[in-house]
Image (cartoon, rainbow, N blue to C red):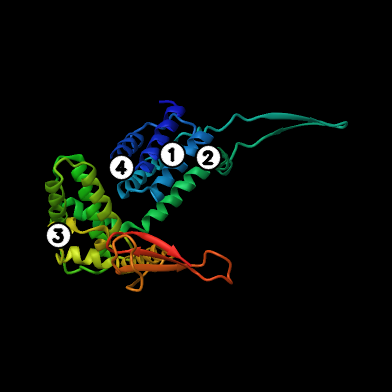
Protein backbone atom coordinates (compact mmCIF):
# COMPACT_ATOMS: atom_id res chain seq x y z
CA UNK A 1 0.00 0.00 0.00
CA UNK A 2 1.32 3.45 -0.91
CA UNK A 3 0.58 6.76 0.82
CA UNK A 4 -2.16 7.70 -1.69
CA UNK A 5 -4.05 4.48 -0.95
CA UNK A 6 -3.67 5.12 2.78
CA UNK A 7 -5.07 8.65 2.41
CA UNK A 8 -7.99 7.25 0.38
CA UNK A 9 -8.85 4.67 3.06
CA UNK A 10 -8.78 7.27 5.83
CA UNK A 11 -11.07 9.57 3.82
CA UNK A 12 -13.49 6.67 3.21
CA UNK A 13 -13.69 6.02 6.96
CA UNK A 14 -14.51 9.72 7.57
CA UNK A 15 -17.17 9.70 4.84
CA UNK A 16 -18.81 6.51 6.12
CA UNK A 17 -19.03 8.01 9.63
CA UNK A 18 -20.62 11.21 8.29
CA UNK A 19 -23.18 9.04 6.45
CA UNK A 20 -23.83 7.14 9.71
CA UNK A 21 -22.70 3.86 8.14
CA UNK A 22 -21.19 2.60 11.38
CA UNK A 23 -20.44 -0.95 10.24
CA UNK A 24 -18.51 0.12 7.14
CA UNK A 25 -16.55 2.79 9.05
CA UNK A 26 -15.49 0.23 11.69
CA UNK A 27 -14.37 -2.25 8.99
CA UNK A 28 -12.17 0.39 7.33
CA UNK A 29 -10.64 1.45 10.67
CA UNK A 30 -9.90 -2.20 11.45
CA UNK A 31 -8.05 -2.47 8.14
CA UNK A 32 -6.13 0.75 8.88
CA UNK A 33 -5.17 -0.52 12.34
CA UNK A 34 -3.44 -3.57 10.80
CA UNK A 35 -1.83 -1.62 7.94
CA UNK A 36 2.02 -1.86 8.00
CA UNK A 37 2.89 1.85 8.12
CA UNK A 38 6.59 1.31 8.89
CA UNK A 39 7.49 2.00 5.25
CA UNK A 40 5.90 5.46 5.22
CA UNK A 41 7.66 8.74 5.88
CA UNK A 42 6.13 9.87 9.16
CA UNK A 43 7.24 13.47 8.53
CA UNK A 44 5.35 13.81 5.24
CA UNK A 45 2.35 16.14 5.02
CA UNK A 46 0.07 13.38 3.69
CA UNK A 47 0.84 11.02 6.57
CA UNK A 48 0.32 13.86 9.07
CA UNK A 49 -3.09 14.58 7.50
CA UNK A 50 -4.04 10.91 7.95
CA UNK A 51 -3.13 11.09 11.63
CA UNK A 52 -5.19 14.24 12.13
CA UNK A 53 -8.22 12.65 10.44
CA UNK A 54 -8.02 9.56 12.69
CA UNK A 55 -7.66 11.81 15.77
CA UNK A 56 -10.72 13.79 14.68
CA UNK A 57 -12.74 10.57 14.36
CA UNK A 58 -11.57 9.50 17.82
CA UNK A 59 -12.99 12.68 19.34
CA UNK A 60 -15.93 13.69 17.14
CA UNK A 61 -17.30 10.59 15.40
CA UNK A 62 -21.08 10.23 15.44
CA UNK A 63 -20.88 6.63 16.65
CA UNK A 64 -19.34 5.64 19.98
CA UNK A 65 -18.10 2.43 18.40
CA UNK A 66 -16.35 4.36 15.62
CA UNK A 67 -14.72 6.60 18.26
CA UNK A 68 -13.40 3.58 20.10
CA UNK A 69 -12.12 1.91 16.93
CA UNK A 70 -10.39 5.14 15.84
CA UNK A 71 -8.68 5.29 19.24
CA UNK A 72 -7.40 1.72 18.82
CA UNK A 73 -6.08 2.57 15.34
CA UNK A 74 -4.39 5.75 16.65
CA UNK A 75 -2.76 3.82 19.53
CA UNK A 76 -1.48 1.12 17.14
CA UNK A 77 0.06 3.74 14.84
CA UNK A 78 1.61 5.56 17.79
CA UNK A 79 3.36 2.37 18.96
CA UNK A 80 4.82 1.82 15.49
CA UNK A 81 6.00 5.44 15.26
CA UNK A 82 7.61 5.28 18.72
CA UNK A 83 9.27 1.94 17.91
CA UNK A 84 10.65 3.15 14.60
CA UNK A 85 11.87 6.44 16.09
CA UNK A 86 13.66 4.55 18.87
CA UNK A 87 15.24 1.78 16.76
CA UNK A 88 15.33 3.04 13.20
CA UNK A 89 17.92 5.81 13.53
CA UNK A 90 21.49 4.81 12.69
CA UNK A 91 23.59 5.82 15.66
CA UNK A 92 26.98 4.90 14.20
CA UNK A 93 29.72 7.33 15.09
CA UNK A 94 30.83 9.20 11.98
CA UNK A 95 34.47 8.96 11.03
CA UNK A 96 36.88 11.51 12.36
CA UNK A 97 37.59 14.42 10.11
CA UNK A 98 40.91 16.14 9.93
CA UNK A 99 41.18 19.73 8.91
CA UNK A 100 44.32 21.69 8.29
CA UNK A 101 44.50 25.26 9.43
CA UNK A 102 47.25 27.32 7.79
CA UNK A 103 48.57 30.62 9.06
CA UNK A 104 51.48 32.80 7.94
CA UNK A 105 53.61 31.46 10.79
CA UNK A 106 52.64 27.74 11.31
CA UNK A 107 50.34 24.91 10.21
CA UNK A 108 48.30 23.06 12.84
CA UNK A 109 46.04 19.99 12.47
CA UNK A 110 42.79 19.71 14.46
CA UNK A 111 40.44 16.78 14.70
CA UNK A 112 36.66 17.12 15.19
CA UNK A 113 35.25 15.14 18.08
CA UNK A 114 32.68 12.38 17.54
CA UNK A 115 29.05 13.45 17.71
CA UNK A 116 27.65 13.08 21.21
CA UNK A 117 24.45 11.25 22.10
CA UNK A 118 22.81 14.61 22.70
CA UNK A 119 23.47 15.64 19.10
CA UNK A 120 21.99 12.38 17.81
CA UNK A 121 18.85 12.91 19.88
CA UNK A 122 18.57 16.45 18.57
CA UNK A 123 18.74 15.12 15.01
CA UNK A 124 15.95 12.66 15.80
CA UNK A 125 13.71 15.48 16.93
CA UNK A 126 14.36 17.36 13.72
CA UNK A 127 13.25 14.29 11.71
CA UNK A 128 9.92 13.78 13.43
CA UNK A 129 10.32 13.32 17.18
CA UNK A 130 7.55 15.91 17.64
CA UNK A 131 5.07 13.37 16.18
CA UNK A 132 6.03 10.89 18.87
CA UNK A 133 5.35 13.57 21.45
CA UNK A 134 1.91 14.14 19.93
CA UNK A 135 1.19 10.42 20.34
CA UNK A 136 2.25 10.57 23.99
CA UNK A 137 -0.06 13.53 24.62
CA UNK A 138 -2.93 11.59 23.09
CA UNK A 139 -2.19 8.66 25.39
CA UNK A 140 -2.29 11.02 28.39
CA UNK A 141 -5.74 12.27 27.39
CA UNK A 142 -7.01 8.72 27.03
CA UNK A 143 -5.81 7.84 30.52
CA UNK A 144 -8.47 10.17 31.94
CA UNK A 145 -11.16 7.78 30.64
CA UNK A 146 -9.44 4.62 31.79
CA UNK A 147 -11.86 3.98 34.67
CA UNK A 148 -14.92 4.11 32.41
CA UNK A 149 -13.26 1.94 29.77
CA UNK A 150 -12.21 -0.60 32.39
CA UNK A 151 -15.81 -0.96 33.61
CA UNK A 152 -17.06 -1.26 30.03
CA UNK A 153 -14.49 -3.94 29.22
CA UNK A 154 -15.46 -5.85 32.36
CA UNK A 155 -19.15 -5.77 31.40
CA UNK A 156 -18.32 -6.72 27.81
CA UNK A 157 -16.27 -9.71 28.98
CA UNK A 158 -19.34 -11.12 30.73
CA UNK A 159 -21.71 -10.63 27.80
CA UNK A 160 -22.55 -13.73 25.77
CA UNK A 161 -21.44 -13.35 22.16
CA UNK A 162 -23.97 -13.99 19.38
CA UNK A 163 -21.44 -14.58 16.56
CA UNK A 164 -23.23 -11.82 14.65
CA UNK A 165 -21.08 -8.72 14.13
CA UNK A 166 -24.02 -6.28 14.13
CA UNK A 167 -25.59 -7.65 17.30
CA UNK A 168 -22.27 -7.89 19.15
CA UNK A 169 -21.44 -4.27 18.32
CA UNK A 170 -24.90 -3.23 19.50
CA UNK A 171 -24.27 -4.94 22.82
CA UNK A 172 -21.00 -3.03 23.20
CA UNK A 173 -22.84 0.27 22.64
CA UNK A 174 -25.50 -0.53 25.27
CA UNK A 175 -22.78 -1.69 27.68
CA UNK A 176 -21.14 1.74 27.42
CA UNK A 177 -24.31 3.42 28.73
CA UNK A 178 -24.54 1.06 31.71
CA UNK A 179 -20.82 1.54 32.41
CA UNK A 180 -21.54 5.27 32.68
CA UNK A 181 -24.27 4.55 35.24
CA UNK A 182 -21.86 2.41 37.26
CA UNK A 183 -19.13 5.09 37.24
CA UNK A 184 -21.65 7.78 38.25
CA UNK A 185 -22.42 5.80 41.40
CA UNK A 186 -26.07 5.23 40.49
CA UNK A 187 -25.83 1.45 40.69
CA UNK A 188 -22.77 0.56 42.74
CA UNK A 189 -24.79 -2.13 44.52
CA UNK A 190 -25.44 -3.91 41.19
CA UNK A 191 -22.80 -6.35 39.95
CA UNK A 192 -21.29 -6.06 36.49
CA UNK A 193 -22.66 -9.54 35.78
CA UNK A 194 -26.19 -8.23 36.31
CA UNK A 195 -25.44 -5.27 34.05
CA UNK A 196 -24.21 -7.69 31.39
CA UNK A 197 -27.48 -9.64 31.62
CA UNK A 198 -29.44 -6.39 31.13
CA UNK A 199 -27.41 -5.64 28.00
CA UNK A 200 -28.28 -9.07 26.62
CA UNK A 201 -31.99 -8.66 27.44
CA UNK A 202 -32.24 -5.27 25.74
CA UNK A 203 -30.42 -6.38 22.59
CA UNK A 204 -32.36 -9.68 22.49
CA UNK A 205 -35.64 -7.72 22.62
CA UNK A 206 -34.46 -5.50 19.76
CA UNK A 207 -33.36 -8.40 17.56
CA UNK A 208 -36.62 -10.23 18.28
CA UNK A 209 -38.72 -7.22 17.25
CA UNK A 210 -36.60 -6.32 14.20
CA UNK A 211 -35.37 -9.71 13.00
CA UNK A 212 -33.75 -8.32 9.84
CA UNK A 213 -31.44 -6.03 11.89
CA UNK A 214 -32.22 -3.35 9.34
CA UNK A 215 -32.92 0.36 9.47
CA UNK A 216 -35.43 0.24 12.33
CA UNK A 217 -33.08 -1.86 14.46
CA UNK A 218 -30.17 0.53 13.86
CA UNK A 219 -32.36 3.60 14.38
CA UNK A 220 -33.48 2.31 17.79
CA UNK A 221 -29.85 1.54 18.71
CA UNK A 222 -28.81 5.12 17.81
CA UNK A 223 -31.76 6.46 19.80
CA UNK A 224 -30.84 4.41 22.88
CA UNK A 225 -27.13 5.23 22.59
CA UNK A 226 -27.79 8.97 22.29
CA UNK A 227 -30.07 9.14 25.33
CA UNK A 228 -28.05 6.71 27.49
CA UNK A 229 -24.82 8.69 27.07
CA UNK A 230 -26.51 12.10 27.48
CA UNK A 231 -24.73 13.76 30.46
CA UNK A 232 -28.04 15.35 31.49
CA UNK A 233 -29.94 12.06 31.52
CA UNK A 234 -28.56 9.98 34.44
CA UNK A 235 -32.09 8.97 35.49
CA UNK A 236 -32.55 6.87 32.35
CA UNK A 237 -29.26 5.03 32.90
CA UNK A 238 -30.16 4.39 36.55
CA UNK A 239 -33.67 3.17 35.71
CA UNK A 240 -32.32 0.68 33.15
CA UNK A 241 -29.55 -0.56 35.48
CA UNK A 242 -32.02 -1.07 38.35
CA UNK A 243 -34.56 -2.78 36.06
CA UNK A 244 -37.15 -0.10 36.73
CA UNK A 245 -37.71 -0.24 32.97
CA UNK A 246 -37.76 -3.72 31.47
CA UNK A 247 -36.23 -4.43 28.05
CA UNK A 248 -39.54 -4.80 26.18
CA UNK A 249 -40.88 -1.49 27.51
CA UNK A 250 -37.57 0.25 26.87
CA UNK A 251 -37.44 -0.46 23.15
CA UNK A 252 -41.06 0.74 22.73
CA UNK A 253 -40.39 4.15 24.32
CA UNK A 254 -40.34 7.13 22.00
CA UNK A 255 -37.39 9.47 21.70
CA UNK A 256 -39.16 12.05 23.87
CA UNK A 257 -39.98 9.49 26.56
CA UNK A 258 -36.33 8.42 26.65
CA UNK A 259 -35.09 12.02 26.89
CA UNK A 260 -34.18 13.90 30.04
CA UNK A 261 -36.63 16.17 31.91
CA UNK A 262 -34.80 19.19 30.54
CA UNK A 263 -35.13 17.95 26.97
CA UNK A 264 -38.85 17.18 27.41
CA UNK A 265 -39.43 20.68 28.80
CA UNK A 266 -37.58 22.19 25.84
CA UNK A 267 -39.66 20.13 23.38
CA UNK A 268 -42.89 21.22 25.07
CA UNK A 269 -41.81 24.85 24.82
CA UNK A 270 -41.09 24.39 21.11
CA UNK A 271 -44.53 22.84 20.52
CA UNK A 272 -46.32 25.64 22.38
CA UNK A 273 -44.44 28.24 20.37
CA UNK A 274 -45.28 26.45 17.10
CA UNK A 275 -48.96 26.27 18.01
CA UNK A 276 -49.02 29.96 18.87
CA UNK A 277 -47.39 30.80 15.54
CA UNK A 278 -49.85 28.57 13.67
CA UNK A 279 -52.95 30.36 14.95
CA UNK A 280 -51.49 33.83 14.96
CA UNK A 281 -52.91 35.98 12.19
CA UNK A 282 -55.96 33.81 11.58
CA UNK A 283 -59.18 35.77 11.25
CA UNK A 284 -61.58 35.64 14.18
CA UNK A 285 -65.19 34.77 13.41
CA UNK A 286 -68.27 35.18 15.58
CA UNK A 287 -71.70 33.47 15.41
CA UNK A 288 -74.87 35.53 15.06
CA UNK A 289 -78.56 35.37 14.06
CA UNK A 290 -78.65 39.02 13.02
CA UNK A 291 -78.24 38.19 9.32
CA UNK A 292 -80.56 36.20 7.07
CA UNK A 293 -79.14 34.11 4.24
CA UNK A 294 -80.60 35.17 0.90
CA UNK A 295 -80.10 31.66 -0.51
CA UNK A 296 -81.64 29.33 2.09
CA UNK A 297 -83.39 31.83 4.39
CA UNK A 298 -81.60 30.57 7.56
CA UNK A 299 -80.23 32.94 10.23
CA UNK A 300 -77.39 30.74 11.56
CA UNK A 301 -74.36 32.70 10.35
CA UNK A 302 -70.79 33.55 11.23
CA UNK A 303 -69.12 36.85 10.40
CA UNK A 304 -65.94 38.82 10.69
CA UNK A 305 -64.93 42.39 9.86
CA UNK A 306 -61.91 43.88 8.08
CA UNK A 307 -60.84 47.42 7.31
CA UNK A 308 -60.70 47.21 3.53
CA UNK A 309 -60.98 50.93 2.76
CA UNK A 310 -59.49 54.10 4.22
CA UNK A 311 -59.41 54.52 7.98
CA UNK A 312 -62.25 57.03 8.06
CA UNK A 313 -64.61 54.59 6.26
CA UNK A 314 -66.60 51.87 8.07
CA UNK A 315 -65.29 48.28 8.19
CA UNK A 316 -66.45 45.64 5.69
CA UNK A 317 -68.48 42.76 7.18
CA UNK A 318 -68.05 39.27 5.70
CA UNK A 319 -70.90 36.81 6.46
CA UNK A 320 -71.04 33.03 5.94
CA UNK A 321 -74.19 30.93 6.24
CA UNK A 322 -73.62 27.90 8.45
CA UNK A 323 -76.40 25.95 6.71
CA UNK A 324 -75.47 26.31 3.02
CA UNK A 325 -72.09 28.07 3.26
CA UNK A 326 -73.33 30.97 1.17
CA UNK A 327 -71.06 34.01 1.55
CA UNK A 328 -71.72 37.74 1.15
CA UNK A 329 -70.38 41.04 2.38
CA UNK A 330 -71.59 44.55 3.12
CA UNK A 331 -70.28 47.81 4.49
User: For mark 2, what is the residue?
Assistant: 128
Q: Earlier in the sequence, mark 1 or mark 2?
A: 1
Q: What separation in Å lies between label 1 and label 2 (alpha carbons)?
A: 9 Å
Q: Residue drawn 41% across and 54% down?
A: 140
Q: Residue drawn 23% across and 51% down?
A: 220
Contact, CB < 8 Å: mark 4 with mark 2?
A: no
Instruction: Mark 2 vs mark 3: give the one in front.
Output: 3
Instruction: Mark 3 vs mark 1: give the one in front.
Output: 3
Question: Which one is in front, 52 or 330?
Answer: 330
Question: Which one is in front, 77 or 120?
Answer: 77
Answer whether residue 94 is visible to the viewer in this image: yes
Q: What separation in Å lies between label 4 and label 3 (alpha carbons)?
A: 26 Å
Instruction: Mark 4 vs mark 1: give the one in front.
Output: 4
Q: Could you tell me residue 309's position as x and y percent?
A: 55, 65
Q: Earlier in the sequence, mark 2 or mark 3?
A: 2
Q: Earlier in the sequence, mark 4 or mark 3?
A: 4
Q: Secondary structure at mark 4?
A: helix
Contact, CB < 8 Å: mark 3 with mark 1?
A: no
Q: How packed is label 2: few (under 14 Cα within 10 Å), some, or many (20 or more)?
A: some
User: For mark 4, what is the residue?
Assistant: 22
Q: What separation in Å lies between label 4 and label 1 (alpha carbons)?
A: 28 Å
Q: Earlier in the sequence, mark 4 or mark 1?
A: 4
Q: Secondary structure at mark 3?
A: helix
User: For mark 1, what is the residue?
Assistant: 81
User: For mark 3, what is the residue?
Assistant: 249
Instruction: Mark 4 vs mark 3: give the one in front.
Output: 3
From this view, report whether residue 20 is shown above or below residue 314: above
Amino acid sequence: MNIEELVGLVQKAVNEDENENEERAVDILTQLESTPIEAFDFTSAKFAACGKSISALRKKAKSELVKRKAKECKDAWTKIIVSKSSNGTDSKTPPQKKTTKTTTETTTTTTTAPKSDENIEEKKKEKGEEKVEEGRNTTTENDEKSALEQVQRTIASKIEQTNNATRDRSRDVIAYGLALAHCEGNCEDISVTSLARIVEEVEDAMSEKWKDLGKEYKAKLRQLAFNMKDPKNPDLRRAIAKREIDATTLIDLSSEELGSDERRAANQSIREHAEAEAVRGQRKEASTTAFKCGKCGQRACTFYQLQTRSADEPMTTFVTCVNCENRWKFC
